[in-house]
Image (tube, rainbow, N blue to C red):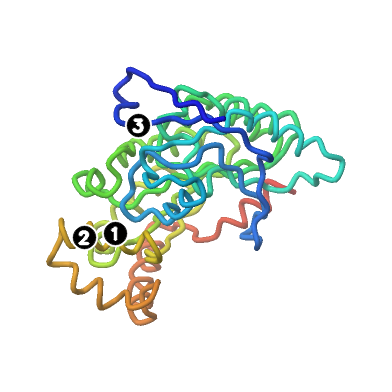
């Protein structure tokens, strides 16, 4: 039974929060990367990223608005405890929020993540958190406690240092400087801390100046690593993103169409981009390897 919750706060305006029950909290992934379990406490995401790869997932719910129809798994904590307490559970790394951000605005109301973290502490279970919000700072003490027991990674996904661009492509995310400040704060714990520059959007956020600024801020935040990844355009994401670019940045549209004849950019473009990325990574002495710190903290 789905219950639609209505709230008066501005962050809930024009959105519907639908409470659902899940049969299980953790979903096994088809391949290890390096984790094999995903935990998503929400379906749909309020950040409104124009390039979001996960909008297809609402098809299974019969919903057409991934950004405003937010489904809340109200029994997810109970289901997670059942799975973690199963005799066969091996304390595998759990990726929290691989499809939807666990710290999107709705989390201010439902407060599911503190209960999730308390379970991870109870079972000493390693986890990875990636977010575009600094709401995760609310749970600083819990993450700090978990970091003393096992591996916990806190990563910020940041695409641009230009706030005007961010407001256009990620309209409901927090500004990039707040995300870096969040990383700097968690560096004071025993958590692994990283920057995810994903996706890099060709002809839009792939400029030398933008990547240089992001890596400079990553260095200032003392992150353990910085990962990058180029934009993929498939299915509904492709149609939505290209329509957005055609409307707002028509001068870039022809080049994007030419580059994205398939779901990904071609090898020539990627080789050129990653030459710049690697030069800048060396400039700021940033590691591109997240597994080393993971192995260190798990041993």
Is 165 displayed left or right of 266 in the figure?
left
Is 220 displayed left or right of 224 in the figure?
left
Q: Name the residue that disc number 3 marks.
A: 15
Residue 248: image quadrant is bottom left
On the image, the x and y values in percent for residue 276 come to: 33, 69
For discs 3 and 2, the disc positioned in front in the rendered view:
3
On the image, the x and y values in percent for residue 226 come to: 45, 55
* Residue at horizontal 44 percent and vertical 30 percent from the top: 17
Residue 220's disc number:
none
The correct choice, above or below, for 281 with respect to 6 in the image is: below
Residue 141: image quadrant is top right
**C-alpha separation, residue under disc 3 versus residue under disc 2:** 25 Å
Q: Name the residue that disc number 2 marks.
A: 245
Residue, far top: 8
Crowding near pointer 2: few (<14 within 10 Å), some, many (20+)? some
Q: Are marks 1 and 2 in contact (CB under 8 Å)?
A: yes
Residue, far left: 251
The correct choice, above or below, for 239 with respect to 263 in the image is: above
Q: Nearer the viewer, residue 182 or 253?
A: 253
Residue 116: image quadrant is top right
């Amino acid at each position: 039974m789905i219950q639609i919750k209505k709230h008066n706060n501005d962050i809930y305006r024009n959105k519907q929060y639908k409470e659902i029950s899940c049969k299980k909290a953790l979903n096994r992934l088809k391949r290890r990367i390096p984790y094999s379990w995903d935990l998503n406490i929400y379906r749909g995401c309020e950040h409104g990223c124009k390039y979001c790869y996960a909008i297809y997932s609402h098809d299974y719910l019969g919903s057409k608005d991934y950004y405003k129809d937010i489904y809340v798994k109200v029994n997810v904590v109970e289901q997670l405890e059942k799975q973690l307490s199963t005799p066969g559970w091996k304390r595998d790394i759990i990726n929290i929020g691989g499809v939807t951000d666990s710290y999107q605005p709705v989390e201010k109301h439902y407060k599911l993540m503190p209960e999730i973290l308390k379970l991870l502490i109870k079972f000493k279970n390693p986890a990875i958190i990636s977010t575009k919000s600094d709401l995760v700072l609310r749970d600083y003490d819990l993450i700090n406690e978990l970091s003393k027991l096992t591996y916990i990674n806190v990563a910020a996904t940041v695409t641009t240092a230009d706030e005007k661009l961010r407001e256009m492509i990620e309209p409901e995310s927090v500004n990039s400087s707040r995300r870096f400040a969040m990383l700097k704060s968690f560096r004071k714990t025993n958590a692994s801390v990283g920057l995810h520059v994903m996706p890099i959007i060709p002809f839009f956020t792939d400029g030398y100046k933008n990547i240089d600024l992001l890596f400079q801020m990553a260095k200032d935040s003392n992150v353990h690593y910085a990962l990058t990844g180029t934009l993929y355009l498939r299915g509904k994401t492709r149609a939505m993103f290209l329509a957005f670019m055609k409307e707002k940045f028509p001068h870039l549209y022809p080049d994007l169409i030419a580059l994205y004849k398939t779901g990904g950019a071609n090898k020539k473009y990627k080789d050129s981009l990653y030459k710049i990325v690697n030069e800048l990574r060396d400039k700021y002495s940033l590691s591109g390897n997240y597994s080393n710190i993971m192995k260190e903290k798990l041993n």
